[in-house]
Amino acid sequence: MSIQLFSCGWFQREDGEKDSKITFFDTPKKDSLPYFRGRDLEAFWVDKGQTPNSARKVDPFVFQNQLSQNIDESHFKGKITIVSFFFARCHGICPNIIRNLKFVQSEITKTQNIQIVSYSVTPDLDTPPELKKFAEEKGIYSKYWNLLTGDREKIFEIARNTFQADTNTTNKNPTRDFVHSEQIFLIDPNLNFRGVYNGNRGESIKTMLDDIKLLVGEFGENH
């Protein structure tokens, strides 16, 4: 019998400690968010008004949300997007991350063009009807928050290759198993990565909300 492993990674890190997957070789600029590049998500800063050439972007995809609507990467265009990974039957760190993101949802209702997108890592189980039921139970509103499901291999591909959201563990079959971390990601209206946070920690969520204000200011000036 084949056993599939779908789990939530758990990592104890002190508040303010940077994620071990992120390297910082550039000098941070005050009141400016970094871009990210490379597989190790190296943070770098550019001068105001400059467009980076090597920044990590959201790769193309097409999945379905909890209302059975097709959602692709163009849905990110022109909006600030918070990205997470989860599965409805998760009893590890997911419930706390969902609670934290519900707080974010309550905050972004006050501002236009900010959204949350959460990819299910058990799409075979998390069908659109199941996600709709999950959303109703958790108070998730599709106007602000899309729960996405679709082809498992394609979701694993974007989770691993675009977001590095899979956690390496022993005895894991990479084609079948997925252990997602607590990371959440901030994406700007041009689909660039602009922040990586610990979705399990309230202080990190507060930092992200402050960073969103910076991003709103940046794109308010440039658009």
Image (spheres, grey):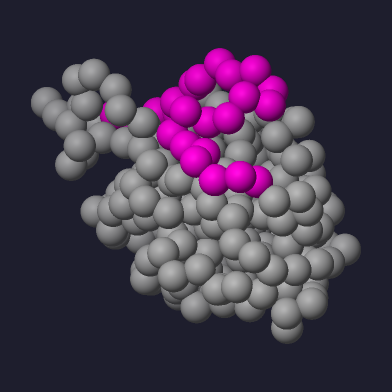
**Viewer-side residue, 8 vs 53:** 53
Magenta: main secondary structure = loop
Quadrant position of the C terminus in the picture: bottom right
In front: 16, or 197?
Answer: 16
Reply above or below: 179 against 169.
below
Tell me where the magenta segment starts and ends, as one range: 5-28
Report the number of numbered marks.
Answer: 0
| Drawn side of residue 95 relative to residue 210, left or right | left
What residue is drawn where x is 19% and y is 20%?
Answer: 171
What residue lies at 78% left-to-right and 53% top-to-bottom?
Answer: 31
Point 30% across, 28% down: residue: 168
Q: Is residue 138 visible?
A: no
Provide residue 166's location: percent of width, then percent of height: 36, 38
166 falls in the magenta region: no
Q: Measured from the top left, where is residue 40 in percent x and y?
A: 38, 42
Question: Is 111 in front, or is 122?
Answer: 111
Q: Position of residue 195 (x, y in %)?
A: 60, 49
Corner quadrant of residue 214: bottom right
Rendered image quadrant of residue 77: bottom right
Residue under the point 24% across and 19% down: 170
